[in-house]
Image (cartoon, grey):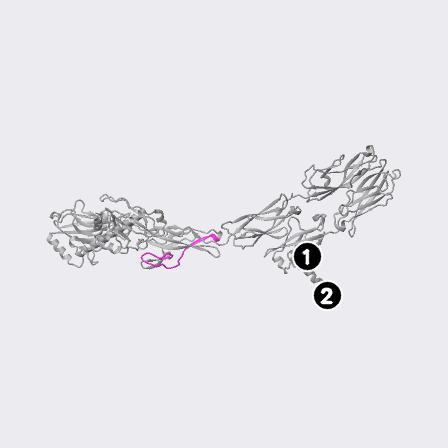
Amino acid sequence: MGERWCAAVLRVLVLQALSWALAGGQVRYSVAEEAKAGTVVGRLAQDLGLEAGEAEARRLRLVAPGRRASVEVSGASGALLVSSRLDREELCGKSAPCALRLEVLLERPLRVFHVQLEVTDINDNAPVFPAARKNLSIAESSVLGSRFPLEGASDADIGVNAQLSYTLSPSEHFSLDLQRSEEYRESLFLVLTKSLDRETTPVHRLLLTASDGGRPSLTGTMELVISVEDANDNAPQFNQTVYKVQLPENATEGTFVARVNATDPDLGSNGEVKFSVSNTFPEKGKNIFLLNAKTGEIHLAGIVDYEEARLYEIQIEARDKGMPPLSGHCKVVLEVLDVNDNAPEVWVTSLSVPVAEDASVGTVVALLSVSDRDSGENGRVRCWVWPASPFGLEATFAGSYSLVLREALDRERVSEYEVEVRAEDGGAPALRASRGLRVPVSDVNDNAPAFAQAVYTVLARENNAAGAELARLWARDPDEAGNGRVSYSLWEGGVGSGGGGGGAAGSSSWWSGGGWRPASSYVSVDAESGRLWALQPLDYEELQVLQFEVRAVDAGEPPLSGNATVQLFVLDENDNAPALLPAAGSAPEAGAVAAAEAAAAAAGVGAGSASGTLWAWAAWGAPAGQVVAKIRAVDADSGYNAWLRYELWEPRGKGPFRVGLYSGEVSTARALDEADGPRQRLLIVVRDHGEPARSATATLSVSLLEAAEAALAAGSSSSSSSPSRSAVGVELGPGAASAATNVWLVVAICAVSSLFLLAVVLYGASRWAPRAAVLSGPGPTTLVCASEVGSWSYSQRHSRSLCVADGAAKSDLMVFSPNFPPPPPPPGPAPKDTQPEPSALLDTVSAPSFTPFSVPFLRPLQKLLFEAGLCSHGLGILGT
C-alpha cells in the first residue's frame, strides 16, 4: 500500500514539473553522446500537449539555426529522435554542460517552442600524450628531490571522465608528483628520489601511464627516455613560477606580452641561460606567441580571439649552456579580454508571404533568430525593424523575435515592402547587422470601379447608321487580376418621368411617341471595352436628349460596381423638306395639292415637295409694294435647317410680282396694267438653309381684275368668320384683313417690344459675365444664335425660340438644353441674289431663370405672329 502511494506521489511530481517546464516556454531533454540513430530522446508531441495525429497535421518540425542538430522530429509519432552521430566533443568541446538550443515550429496557428537538448558525456576518449616518446637529460649531479616537469596527457571528455591519474613504471630513482589547482591546469613532475650514477645507468627508460576516471577506465602511455649527463649541477631559476598576463583580443601583431627572467649561479657557459617554449595550451598557441631566446620577451606573432580561446598557458624553459645543461621552468598564463569585434547575426527561421492586404493587425509574418558571439554588454543585442511601419518586432524568447503586422495594408498604395531587420549590440562602439526581407502584399477586392467622369456628354447626329460607335467609356479599378477586370452594362434601374422627349435624371427609359421606351432600345454598351453603340438610327424630331446610366462591375468576390450618367444629345440633320401650311380657318380640303417634285428637279431646286395650284386676286393699277398673298411653310428640322427662304423661280426677269426672301409675301414689283394679262402664274420655291438644302415648290395663280371686281371679291371674303384665304398656304392681301387683326398687331408689337428689352438686358449680362465662371457654374447654360432676319421658324417640334431685335439687325434667340456644346458656324454664304448674311453670333450665357420651360408664353405668341404674318413687320418697326 505504501509503495502505491509513493508511486502516485512521484507521478504527480513528474507531471507538475513537466507543466512548469511547458509554462516557461521551454522543454528540456537529455541524451548521451554516441547514441544510435533512431534513439528516442523524448515524446515531444505529448510533452507539448498535442493529441494523437495532431503533430503531423500541424506540421510539427524542428529548426536549428546555425548548426547541424543531429536530431529530428518524427512526423508520425511526434517523438524527438536521434538522426545522426552525436559527438559531444565535436559539438561543445570542453564546455560543460553541452546544451543545444532547438526551436520547434507548430502551424495552424503558428507557434514556436524552445527545446534544450543536453548531450551527456560518456567515456569514449582515452587520455592522449603530446608525443609517444619524451627524451630527458638529467645531470648526474642533480640533487635528490629535483623536479622535472612533464607534459601531461589530455582527455577530450569532461567531468570525471577527464580526471586523469598517472602511474610510472617501477623505478628506484624516479617518482611522480601531480599538483592539482582549482585555478590552473594540473602540473606533472618527475621527481628524483635517488642519486643518479651515469656510469651505472646512463639511460633510464620509464613508461608513464595516464588513466581517466571513467567506467571502464581508459589509459594512454608515453615512454620517458632519461639520459644522465655529467658536470653542470646548477639549473636556472625563474623569479616567478607563474606569470599572469591580460591581453585584449584586438591586440595587433608584434604587441609585447610579457618578459620572463631566470638566473643561474654557475659561471661561464654553465651560467648562460637560453629561453625556449616547452609546451603551449591550447596547442595552436605555439604559432601565436614568439619568445626571444636571449631576453625572455614574449611578443604577439598572430591574432588572439576571445571567442576561440579565452586562456593560454605557455610553459617556458630556461636552459644553461653547461655540460650537461640544466634547466628551469615557469608558466605564463595569458587571459584574453573580450572586445566588441563580432557584429550581431540575424537569421530568418520562417517567412509567411505574401500577406493579404486585409490581414488583421498582429498577424505574424516571419520568425527571426538573433545572436552575438561576444559576451557581456558586447553580446547584448537590441533589435528593431525599418521602416517602423507597417511592421514591428515582438520578442518571443531570448534571441527570438516575431515580425508582426502593426498597421492595415493597402496593396493599391504599396504592393510590396522591403523590410530591414536591424540589430545592434551594447558594445562601444556598437556593431550593427541587418537582414532584408521582401514582403509582397496579395490583393483583395476592396476597390469599386470608378469612371473618369460622373457625367458623360455624347453628341450624335441623327440618321446615324445602326451599330455606329457613339463613345467609349472607361472605368478604372486599381485592384489586380479578376478584382480589377471591369465589365460594363446599361443600368435598367428606374423609370423616368416627363414627356416630349425628356426623362428624369437616373432613368434609363424614354418617352417616344407611342409610350415609354428603355434606353437599351436605342443604345448598347460593350461589356469588355465600354464602347457605346447605337442600336438604331436616331431621329432628332423624335428624340433630342437621352439620359441613362452605365454600370461598371468588377469580377471580384463579392463584386463591386460604379455608375456614370450619360447624356446623349442628338444633333439635327437636314432630313426634312419644307412643307406648305394650309390656310388658317380653312378646311383641309380647301385647295388641291398636287406633286410637283419633277418640275422642281427640272428647275434645279433640289429634293423637296410640291403643292397644288394656289389662287389670289389683284387689281389692275395696284401700286408697287402691295401685298397680294403670303406663302406659309414650316420645316420639321431646327435651327438653320428650319430657316426658310422664298424665291420666285418663274417667271424670271422683271415680272410684275416679287416674293419676300424670308417673309413669303407676294407683292407687286411695279404698278399693274392691262399689258400684264388677265392671269399671272408664279412658281415659288421654298428652300431651307441646310446642307444640302431641301425645298418645296408652290404654284400661285394671280387673277388680275378690275378695281371694282377686286373690291367686290375682297368685300365678300371679309364677311366670312375669319380672314379670307384664297387657297391652301396663301393669305390674301391687306385689303382682306379684318379689324381684329389690327388689334392683335398692336398687342404683338407691345409684346415684341418687351421681349426686345429683356433680350438686350440678357445680352449685356452675357457680354460682361466671366466666361470661365459661366462654363463651370451650377446653373443651366443656354445657347444664343443670331441671324440677320427676325422671322420665326415655327416648326412642329415647338422649338423654344425668342424673337428679339438689336438695332437694325434682326436676331433669333434659341435656347438649348444644358451641357450642349456650341454648334458649328452657319453654312456657307448666301446666294448671290440675296443680301449678304452677317456673321452669326454664338455665345454661351448663364441664365438660371431663362430655361427652355421658363417662357411658355412665347409659343402662342410665336404662332400668332406667324399666322398673322406680322413678326417681320413688327421687327422692322422696332428696328427702325
Q: Quadrant of residue 81?
A: bottom right
The location of residue 624, given as percent across then percent down, is 15, 47
User: Magenta segment: does it hold 432?
Assistant: no
Which label sits on residue 42? 1
User: Magenta segment: does it hold 484?
Assistant: yes
Relative depth, front residue between 330 and 686:
330
- Mark 1 neighbour class, 10 Å CA radius: few under 14, some 14 to 19, many 20 or more: many
Q: Earlier in the sequence, mark 2 or mark 1?
A: 2
Q: What amino acid does circle 2 point to?
A: Trp
Relative depth, front residue between 397 and 523:
397
- Mark 2 neighbour class, 10 Å CA radius: few under 14, some 14 to 19, many 20 or more: few
- In the image as oriented, which residue stretches furthest toward the bottom? 1
User: Element under label 1?
Assistant: strand
- Which quadrant does the N terminus fall into? bottom right
Question: Quick check: 757 left or right of 564?
Answer: left
Which label sits on residue 5? 2
User: Element under label 2?
Assistant: helix
The location of residue 607, given as percent across then percent down, is 26, 49
Q: Is residue 440 visible?
A: yes
Q: What amino acid does circle 1 point to?
A: Gly
Asked if the residue under mark 1 is in contact with the one under mark 2, i.e. CB atoms within 8 Å, the reply is: no
Span shown in magenta: 482-509
Question: Quick check: 661 left or right of 401?
Answer: left
Question: Quick check: 860 left or right of 383?
Answer: left
- In the image as oriented, which residue stretches furthest toward the front? 239
Question: Quick check: 816 left or right of 476?
Answer: left
The location of residue 449, given as percent across then percent down, is 45, 53
Q: Quadrant of residue 5?
A: bottom right
Separation (CA) of disc 2 from disc 1? 26 Å
